[in-house]
Image (cartoon, rainbow, N blue to C red):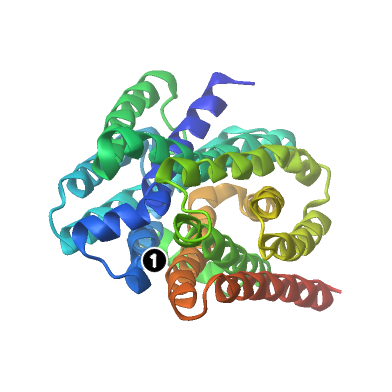
Amino acid sequence: MGTWRLVFAAVCAVAVAGIYAAQPLLPLVGADLGVARAHLGWVVAAGQVGYLVGLVVLVPLGDVVDRRVLLVGHLGMTAVGALVVASAARAWVLFGGLVVVGLFAVVVQTAVAYAASLSAPGERGRTLGVVTSGVVIGILGARVVAGAVAGVWGWRGVYVVLAVLLVALAAVVWRVLPPDPRVGRDGYRRVLVSLGGLFGERLFVSRGLIAFFLFASFGALWGGLALPLAGAPWWLSPAQIGLFGVAGLAGAVGAARSGRWADGGLAGAVTGGGLVVLVVSWWAIGQVSLWWLVVGVVVLDFAVQVVHVSNQHLLTAAHPERTSSVVGGYMVFYSLGSALGAAATTAAFDATGWVGSNALGAGFAVCGLVVWVWARRVAL
């Protein structure tokens, strides 16, 4: 495995961790800054809002300027946002810092697109499998590390550690990765127009809608999981809650081979199978048992990774000349879905408890499966 693949995976893991590190910390953040329980979902959603803006405004730059320069600059600005969060004395400063973290964390999509463009066509799925595994490791591993760090240095210490890692990684990127050989192919305005045109393509829209519901379901689980676990009957600490990320990591790592399946021409079928597995995972999550919850988390994260890799493989293969734009546009759906899931699940939990959050997540999963069936029927 090339060193450059591992560097790209590390960029994805550390950058995306800034958006999701808050999830096991929600009770601590709410108590410290006076954020009501029903509104805690916005602590996670704020990062997704910034991410959405960055996908439209910043990611297309990858088809215009040297992506190595973008990686270094965006990692540095993500570190600045993390320091703002760490020093926040009021909720609005916290939300502002999280928006900045999310805005520049789109370095993840620049990294994915750059890695795809450096790969030979027959190895693109493998590369995407490795690099996007970094994304999922960052999303889920952030919970484990954040819970452990918060137990020692408090929730603010989590963001100080994150800032240090981001700066160190920026230096590694500059030293290890090659300059982008595809600089200046199109003007920025032309790239933006081209991005808008993708929303008229059936493949792009169907895969985008699947991603929307996929990550809304994902967000419905992880965006509010800390609330029931921190209360009766379990009363788990942030460090213990963070350990659920290990279960998620097991599922995500288990799906690493999905890139090879996509290389073998099975991306469409794998997507459908993954969505069925996602729906089934919510049955396990809905059982009133920590053991069943662990099983459900493993299965859910396996399904999410499989579908996500398959989606990106199909889209980058269809648009090899503009991977940054197509990945950025696709991830708009991801960001909207993640924000919806995170914001809605805490409101649902506040109103109806864990049953309501489960019904919400399962409903999103079913919607994703319906879109896949519809897209298959239209294509026939």
Q: How many marks?
A: 1
Q: Is residue 36 visible?
A: yes
User: Which element type, helix, strand or loop, lies under badge 1?
Assistant: helix
Quadrant, the C terminus: bottom right
Where is residue 83? Give x, y as percent. Answer: 20, 42
Q: Quadrant of residue 38?
A: bottom left
Where is residue 280? Give x, y as percent. Answer: 77, 63
Return the residue found at the far front.
Answer: 233
Q: Nearer the viewer, residue 291 or 314?
A: 291
Q: Nearer the viewer, residue 139 or 358?
A: 358
- Indicate whether 141 appears above or below 20: above
Other residues around mark 1 within 10 Å, as few (<14) / some (14–19) / many (≥20): many
Q: Is residue 154 left or right of residue 324?
A: left
Q: Quadrant of residue 146?
A: top left
Where is residue 312? Give x, y as percent. Answer: 63, 52
Q: Is residue 17 left or right of residue 29?
A: right
What residue appears at the point 42 percent right and 58 percent down from the top-left corner? 191
Q: Is residue 216 left or right of residue 160?
A: right
Where is residue 275? Give x, y as percent. Answer: 74, 62
- Indicate whether 299 appears above or below 263: below
What residue appears at the point 16 percent right and 58 percent down from the top-left corner? 93
What residue appears at the point 66 percent right and 71 percent down from the top-left corner? 362
Check disc 1 and report the residue beneath it: 41
Return the residue found at the far bottom.
Answer: 351
The amino acid at mark 1 is Gly
What residue appears at the point 52 percent right and 62 percent down from the top-left corner? 219
Quadrant, the N terminus: top right
